[in-house]
Image: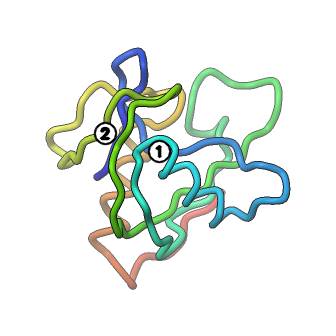
Amino acid sequence: MLLVQEKNGTWALPGGWCDVNVSVMENTIKEVKEEAGLDVVVKNVIAIQDREKHNQPIYAYKVCKIFMICEVEGGVFKENSETIGFDYFTKDKLSLLATKKNNEEQIQMCFDAYKASNHWKIYFD
């Protein structure tokens, strides 16, 4: 699992707010490039989650989180305003997570989706 290291040392899946006039797929590609320096192709949707049902603290506004499976095609990491590095982790070797962004349950869901491949049923709440 690809995770990016935040400036505070915690780790999270690459991601961010979807910009105006940018599709979810385009935004996914953009965020992975900005935060990990990698060029990806979006392969599938893993889940669409109501953030306040899965992450703390609760925000004053509603957030919908969309998790995607991507395939890396290339790229090179460059330190940036959001992240200081990236690495690949196995599910039994996760580092300290940025739990406001992703928790262990969400990371496990991503591992499960990857393992299930084309048999994964999109989760949404």
Residue 57: x, y in percent? 62, 21
Foreground residue among 41 and 10: 41
In the rendered view, tell whether residue 114 sits above or below residue 36.
below
Give the quarter of the figure containing the C terminus.
bottom right
Residue 82: x, y in percent? 51, 28
Q: Residues within 10 Å of mark 1 (few under 14, many from 20)?
A: many
Q: Which mark is residue 14?
A: 1
**Residue for point 77% across, 49% down:** 19
Q: Residues within 10 Å of mark 2 (few under 14, many from 20)?
A: many
**Residue for point 37% across, 70% down:** 71
Colour mode of the rendering: rainbow
**Residue for point 37% across, 47% down:** 107
Helix, strand or loop at mark 2: strand
**From the viewer's perspective, is 42 left or right of 16?**
left
What separation in Å lies between label 1 and label 2 (alpha carbons)? 9 Å
Helix, strand or loop at mark 1: loop
